[in-house]
Amino acid sequence: MDERPIGLMDSGLGGLSVMRVLHKQLPRESLIFVGDQGHFPYGTKSQEELQHLVLNIGHFLVDQGIKMMIVACNTATGAALPLLQRVLPVPVIGVIEPGAIAAVHHHLQTVGVIGTASTIAKGAYPATIHRLDPQMKVFSHAAQEMVPIVEHGLTGTPQAQTTVNSALAFFDQHPVDGLILGCTHFPFLTPEIQQKMSSDVLLIDPAYETIKQAQTTLTDRDLLANQGTGTIKLFTTGERAELVAGAERWLTGQFTSCDHVDL
Ligand code: DGL
């Protein structure tokens, strides 16, 4: 039993799509989240820049006394997961391998992957999927323009649907059975994405498999919290009001505090 918090990070609001699953599945866990809005977006940055930013956040979270870190960002996972796992004194879990495992579990013949420019250029999803299932056909496509729609609170608007329609037009010529939402901002565009893709295309949110892995790691190391309801502390390197607005919407206001931090 271990009441220390779990640390999470993202470039912005996307990480809240992982937090909401984590809080639902493991409500006793206390969480600390850093949204790096001060350096948003991540998807167009170099690997070196990303490693520097993410490592900095990892050290901050360790200083807050976390027992485990979840990199709730595909771009950060692709650029910095092995580095974090090597350097930080706590277990670190990313979202890409769980997303690939989830796709393989569904026995799809053809899967699409959408993510930031960085995630798609890096190719970690096809590489991981093909390690698990060399037969699966994978179509990867960058949809960076969908990220600011979520970050700037525009989901559910006609602009959101227009942006999704044009970002995913690639799949008109490349039909898929399932689509991995390989950016943590994208689950918040689920209605728009499902509207654009045929209704029988399965949308895969890697958060569920990620939280399953987190639960296994905590259980195996005897790190689960087992009393009360956990607290949720939010930090942003950007405007506090923007993270508060995002958390009111996507965490339905379930957070304990929200503060600005310079990192
Ligand atoms: N939410 C992020 C991801 O999962 C990054 C979005 C961005 O900042 O470009 O990749």
Image (cartoon, rainbow, N blue to C red):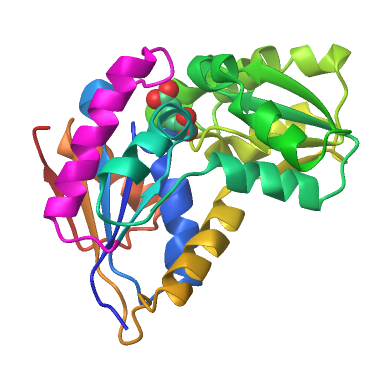
- Residue 47 found in image quarter: top left
Q: Quadrant of ligand 1?
A: top left
Task: Report x, y in % for residue 178.
Answer: 80, 37
Magenta highlight range: 40-67
Say if the magenta span includes residue 61: yes
Q: Main secondary structure of the magenta part?
A: helix
- Answer left or right for 106 relative to 81: right
- Residue 176 found in image quarter: top right
Residue farthest to the left, as pictured: 262
Q: Residue at x 49, y 17 (%)?
A: 118
Q: Nearer the viewer, residue 242 or 203?
A: 203
**Taking the image as drawn, is residue 194 in sight?**
no
Q: Residue at x 37, y 12 (%)?
A: 46
Q: Is 66 placed above or below 2 here?
A: above
Q: Is 159 placed above or below 207 here?
A: above
Task: Report x, y in % for residue 179.
Answer: 74, 34
